[in-house]
Amino acid sequence: MERKTIILNKNILHLDISASSYKFLTILILYSDKEGRCYPSTRTLSEKYHLSRDTINRAKKELENKNVIRVYKRTKGSGKIDSNEYFINKEYLAESIQSEKKLELFDYDWLNDTGEFYD
């Protein structure tokens, strides 16, 4: 099932953060569960979303310093470092909407938007 997330949280819009940190936070929200926890690897974030490791690390640090996220290193049973575990402060979580639901906001059906623009 395709998952679509619409960020309706005004707290995010008022954060004084860089554009790359905003993108990084948005991606974490896409991966997060209801509690704000997610585990995307740096490799996945880098390859899938075209973010350099340096950009990821700067965004991570900026969001941690603003208390938007907490980051914990995860390790495998052998002690080898695995992906990070991210916790998003609940104040900044967005509502995740499953595609079978219909969300109408401002009389617009956001879930059936094809993303195409017309003149």
Image: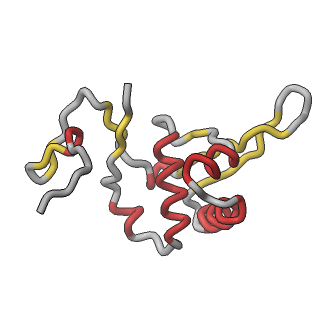
Q: Nearer the viewer, residue 45 or 118?
A: 118
**The quadrant where residue 52 appears:** bottom right
41 relative position to 63: left or right: right
Q: Nearer the viewer, residue 36 or 57?
A: 57
Q: Residue at x 48, y 47 (%)?
A: 29
Q: Residue at x 26, y 49 (%)?
A: 115
Q: Residue at x 84, y 40 (%)?
A: 81
102 relative position to 50: left or right: left
Question: Looking at the image, which residue sits at the far front?
Answer: 119
Q: Residue at x 86, y 26 (%)?
A: 77
Question: Looking at the image, which residue sits at the far right?
Answer: 78
The colour scheme used to paint the residues is secondary structure
76 relative position to 23: left or right: right
Q: Nearer the viewer, residue 76 or 118?
A: 118
Point out the image quarter for the C terminus. Answer: bottom left
Q: Residue 1, how many percent across, how many down? A: 38, 24
Q: Is residue 113 above or below residue 75?
A: below
Q: Residue 55, how many percent across, how many down? A: 65, 65
